[in-house]
Image: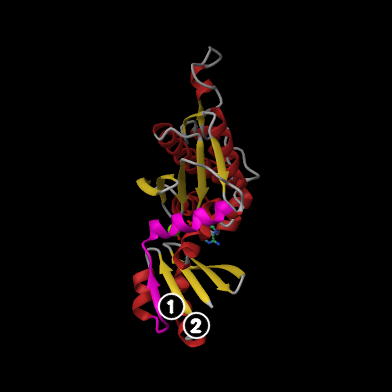
Amino acid sequence: MKIGIDAGGTLLKIVYIEDRERRFEKRPSSEIDSLIGELNRDHTEDEIFLTGGKAEYMDEKLEPPTRLSIEFDATYRGLSRLMEEQGVSLGRFVYLNVGTGTSFHQADGSGQKRVGGSGVGGGTLIGLSSLLTGVDSYEDIVRLAAQGNRDKIDLQVHHIYAGRPTPIPGDITASNFGRILMDDLPNLSDADKLQAVIGLIAETVTVVGISLAEGFDTKDIVFIGSTLLNNGVMTEIIGRYAGLKGVNPHIIENGEYSGALGAVL
Ligand code: ADP
Ligand code: MG
């Protein structure tokens, strides 16, 4: 069996490949030592392929034979394979890996170039959510956020223009969290706040992605990373912002496993 592991800041993404079978698994990165123990005990005959920020740490402690890949190359290889399998065929495109933080890449048929990064990502989603509401589990955050309403939190362009014609669409955000009035605070639910947190992250990364796409002469933006998982609020915002600019967003199924898969390939 071949085992690919992308050991990230928050999650360990694991792919087990045997014959033609492929199985994906995720664990919190805090369980890295128990994963290492398990591999040293039960997988001594298997080949292990590592990538991600914690790959070297794993490599030092693993007994089975290992191979290390550079994260950005592995992710591009895995992503290319997943896109091919899912029939997503794009010439030039921009892709965003929305992990604990976010990295931005431009890709054409021949390879990828990392063009930037932002500390705003899935870690921000969890951190700000816990600070504002005390809710700290990812599943709870995305579930509750879908029931909220961020209208009283985010300042939209039409709020500023107050009925006068707006030079850009009135319903886009002028200032995330910019509308909060002290009088409204008691009326804001956790769900409202969580939706606004996701809004901040989704809009920030999408807007950067759109600018990069314009500069790279493409209309296609691919999104990967565990921050998109079951995250309807995030994917809805991505779709709406991309639509305003005539950009096509592509959310790749199992995209968060790109690095783990690419490490094996
Ligand atoms: P990294 O490679 O940096 O670990 P990922 O692409 O795995 O990043 O994304 C991590 C983010 O995914 C977290 O910050 C969180 O917002 C989100 N996430 C999705 N599912 C989970 C989960 N089960 N546990 C924790 N975070 C999760
Ligand atoms: Mg990662």
Assign the N terminus to one quadrant of the image: bottom right
Query: Is residue 71 depicted above or below 125 in this figure?
Result: below
Instruction: Provide the residue designation for mark 2.
Output: 38
Looking at the rendered structure, the kind of residue marked 2 is: Glu
Q: Does residue 186 lie above or below 74 as drawn?
A: above
Q: Which residue is mark 1?
A: 33
Residue in the picture at 63% in, 45% down = 146
Note whether residue 135 is visible.
no
| Nearest the eye: 10 or 60 | 60
* Residue 77 painted magenta: yes
Left or right position of 26 against 103: right
Instruction: Please provide percent x and percent y for residue 80.
Output: 50, 53
Q: Magenta includes 9?
A: no
Q: What x and y, as percent, mark residue 117?
A: 36, 47
**Residue at screen point 51% across, 75% down:** 2
**First in residue order: circle 2 vs circle 1:** 1
Magenta region: which residues? 62-84
Q: Is mark 1 within 8 Å of ligand 1?
A: no
Q: Amino acid at mark 1?
A: Asp
